[in-house]
Amino acid sequence: MAVYPIIMTQSSFTHRDNLKYPYEERGLQFGDGIYEVIRIYNGEYYLLKEHVDRLFRSAAAVKINLAVTKEEMTQLLLQLLERNKMNKDGKVYLQVTRGSAPRDHVFPEGIPANVYAYVQDLPRNTEKMDAGVATITQRDVRWENCYIKSLNLLPNVLAKQEAKENGCYEAILHRNGLVTECSSSNVYLVKDGKIYTHPATNNILHGCVRMRVEKFAKDLGIPFIEESFTVDDIATADEILLSSSTSEVMPIISVDDKQIADGKPGKITKQLQQAYVADANIIEPDKVSN
Ligand code: PDD
């Protein structure tokens, strides 16, 4: 087969050997890959095992073969922080795609997965965590395997952008009125002292922080009920909150311009925030004794 080496890129033409990115890459061309975002506090991973476990679950679900074991991946991720002398609050983005091969929907044979990970600073968003955030609701138009942390994030991206254009922090997604999760976080409703959230089915990402929130609730004696609530239930909620590796435990104080309860972060949300800080060994500046 002839090779046509000149590639159009933006509005110019270049030899394919000069391209800065691998254009025939399955993550780029098909979204054929998976990822993780792992939180770092004070130079140490939070919930590393949970993230590595989920990465391997996602890989198995989409039949991507990782060349390393869970233990080896864990060691590589630890080395990444060491080599970067990472000693602050941050995050690691880790991506695995099915590899580089001529474009064909069918899996390429004998091609290794492409893996990369990098570190970024990420200070804690304490201002928002103290004040709470506004949200909008959006239809959940994603596929039926949202438990896989796949690179196909277009519906999530569009929902989050819609939130931003409405002056909001997140979009709460629902399927026919049943709330699933947010565009990049899990969501919970508090009513009469009980926490409600969508069960960990295929329709939501099984958040690593969500798992901890469940444990915090159990430790605090707060019923954690895996039962989906509806968009209509939000109007009479005592508290609404979301959780993720980057947002931690975040109070939601309004939904679609309607205030939740008194418009302030609720009591249970604050208890969960305290439990999170303790669990992640976070040293809060005002609590440091000199
Ligand atoms: N998002 N649901 C969705 C759709 C998510 O993308 C995320 C994480 C979560 C929370 O998962 P965890 O508690 O494991 O962070 C729930 C990451 C942070 C992101 O895409 O940037």
Image (tube, helix red, strand yellow):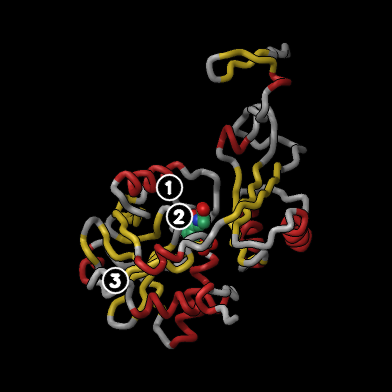
CA gap, disc 2 to disc 3?
22 Å
Residue 96 on image: x %, y %: 66, 46
Q: Does mark 1's beta carbon lie closer than 8 Å to ligand 1?
A: yes
Residue 84 on image: x %, y %: 73, 54
Q: Does mark 2's beta carbon lie closer than 8 Å to ligand 1?
A: yes
Q: Residue at x 31, y 57 (%)?
A: 135
User: Are the residues tagged 2 and 3 within 8 Å (C-beta)?
Assistant: no
How packed mark 1 is, by other alpha carbons closer than 10 Å (few <14, some 14-19, many 20 or more), is some
User: Are the residues tagged 1 and 2 within 8 Å (C-beta)?
Assistant: yes
Res 202 seen here: no
Q: Along the line of sight, which residue is nearer the eye, 126 or 271?
A: 126
Element carrying mark 1: helix
Q: Residue at x 66, y 30 (%)?
A: 21
Element carrying mark 2: loop
**Label 1 or label 2, whichever comes before in sequence order:** 1
Type of amino acid at the residue the image marks with label 2: Ser
**Label 3 or label 1, whichever comes before in sequence order:** 1
- The residue tagged 3 is 264
Q: Disc number at residue 184?
A: 2
CA gap, disc 1 to disc 2?
7 Å
